[in-house]
Amino acid sequence: MGEDEGSTFFTVERGVLDLRTVDLQQTEGIIKGEWEFYYNQLINPEDFKQNINLPTYVSPWTSWSELTNEQEGGNYPTLGHATYRLRILHQKGIDEMAIHMPGIGSSYNLFVDGKLYLSNGKIGTSRETSTPFEVKQTGAIELRGVQSEIVLQVSNYHHGTGGGFGQPAILGPADALFAETVKDTSSVYLLVGGLLLMGLFFWVIHIFWKYDRSIRHFAYMTLALACWFIFREDRNFLLFFPLSWEWETTLEYIFMYIALYHCIEFYAKIFPGDYFSKAAKVLRWLTLGFIVVTVILPAYIFTTYTFVHNIVAAVYVGLCGVYMIQKVYQRAPFSGFVMIGLTVLAINVIYMELIQYKLIYTNNRFQAIGFLTFILSQSLILAYKFSALFIQERILSEKNQVQSEELEQQAEQLSTFNQLLQQQKEQLQHANTQMVSSFNAALQIQQAMLPHIDRLKEKVQDTFVLWKPKDVVGGDFYWFKDTGDHIIIAVVDCTGHGVSGALMSMSASNMLHEITGKGIYTPDKILQEMHRKALDQFQQDKVSNMASMDAGIVVINKVKSKLQYAGARVPLLYCDPSEEELLRIKPTKISLGQARKDKKVSFSYHSIPLKKGTTFYMFTDGYQDQFGGPNDRKFSISQLERFLNDIKDKPMGLQQLHLMDRHNTWKGEKGFQIDDMLVLGVRI
């Protein structure tokens, strides 16, 4: 109820309203101004004939917490009871008048000339003796004589922002005010009915179309708005469902928060992975927090914190508006509909806030139109999506028909092609069988070339060799020779793997036999000879190729009790019984057979005292370069060194098993070996 364009204000001055020049049977007006105010007193009309305390003058339409207590200082408490009094000067004897009282989150009695005309809940002087009720009322009154008195008793022990009325009362002809009441009620019925029908309609669609979750959130948002509007604007709807004022107010706030929650989720599903989705992650938890607080706390507490929710909602709508301006400029789908909805929603929210802060006075019809416009504009988003789906389905149907005809033609072609593939498969199987036989023959040749591990154990009992080519055959191999005074052990990594690596390994093995057959037993000299022979054999100075070898040579000199070592990119790890940690001897960083300007290459020579229990290891780069682990990176030489240091005191055969298990674990079930792998360990 209230001010349309051209409506009148009745202004009260220090508790007196002078309407003697106003034709009240033709004019309705909003009562503004200051009534007499008696805080913490419930004064009956007949008691004003006695001497009472001097009043203060305040507006009944202002919350008590906003009023200044001039006697005690500060503001009045929100919770309490009080009496308002208004004296009206008017023409003689006016019948068929009416007064409209807005809803209030507390209880009141309204007397006119000592007669009780309107009552809302039960007034009292404590929370226990008062019962709040919130409903808008319009009642017929009589103004007798030339002066009338309105006494308004108010109790508020339940609402955190109560005490005063949210909107002013309206005084006017009974016919006009009751007609306004019918219009207001009809607008609420129209809004609630429209929201319920639309919400149920989209909820049914959601049941049959669960793939699009935006439909579900839109349906729940619409239903929650309908319920919220019932509790907020006209609780006469609830006469068939008797609830306490506390529960009615709790449900009013809960439905408000639920509507906001599903509005946030609706936009997040319309623009998945976009700004709305990011905002929803934060705002959904804030909204759920509001709901939990509302359920747990009593109304006189949670009603005081609605401004926080209003700020959150305002910030969300504002940021969404700024974001949607960009989307509209980019001509994103649905952006126009969303922008219309957000604009209407923002106007409606601002309008409600202006009413809340008494900057304007109006009826509910504008709010009803605003909310219906918002919901209808957003429903166009879903209608647009349905239309796009139907068009897409029709296009797909036409494409499927064309594709069906094409598939029939392709099926005939595939049948012919499959016959050809079957013939090629049989040819490939035959070729594969021959290739596997060749690989197996190559493996037998390479295994025959390698010295058997049992022969090495006859000379050095405590030893192991972990040899695992990437393919059937490979370029990594180990070699040893016992000359009587010397045991020569070599670990060699030839370029490449598979057949090419195996061919190079046979050439390298022949080199070792020839060199040691000439009586050359010093490891650095052996490497120098291998380098010279490799240069001649691979002819890198004449032909560009990548052929080369990495090698590590250990000579166990029985006469001098020395362990002699030289390496070409193959390091040596060793420790004697007196050492707790493995020591690493770095090799010379030159590959055998690698073309260089200076063909005379020297390799670093190292001699170590030989003691019983001395342990040493040589290995190619295949183990340390294996990719795997949680970050799919190389195993690395430092990690291999630490692992060997941890297991060095275990039996050599058990060390071989540990190395194989660690490699398989690092590589993983889905990994694959990237290079030939050779690790040799010896304990004297």
Image: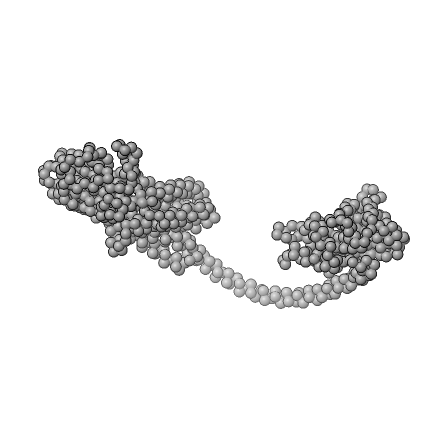
**Picture layout, residue 360 above or below residue 445:** above
Q: Position of residue 219 (x, y in %)?
A: 36, 53
- Please tell me in which quadrant of the rendered image residue 676 appears: bottom right
**Picture layout, residue 97 above or below residue 438:** above
Tell me the residue at 11%/43% (across/down). Answer: 95
Q: Is residue 204 left or right of residue 580?
A: left
**Picture layout, residue 12 above or below residue 542:** above
Question: How many numbered dots are placed on residues in this image?
Answer: 0
Q: Nearer the viewer, residue 57 or 531?
A: 57
Q: Position of residue 660 (x, y in %)?
A: 70, 58
Q: Nearer the viewer, residue 242 or 347?
A: 242
Rendered-image quadrant of the N terminus: top left
Tell me the residue at 16%/45% (across/down). Answer: 116
- Please tell me in which quadrant of the rendered image residue 497 appears: bottom right
Rendered-image quadrant of the C terminus: bottom right
Q: Position of residue 369 (x, y in %)?
A: 29, 46
The colour scheme of the drawn protein is one colour
Tell me the residue at 35%/41% (across/down). Answer: 307
Q: Look at the image and tell me whether residue 494 can be seen.
A: no
Q: Position of residue 658 (x, y in %)?
A: 70, 57
- Please tell me in which quadrant of the rendered image residue 476 appears: bottom right
Q: Residue furthest right?
A: 518
Q: Nearer the viewer, residue 290 or 163?
A: 163
Q: Look at the image and tell me whether residue 560 can be seen.
A: yes
Tell me the residue at 82%/46% (across/down). Answer: 606
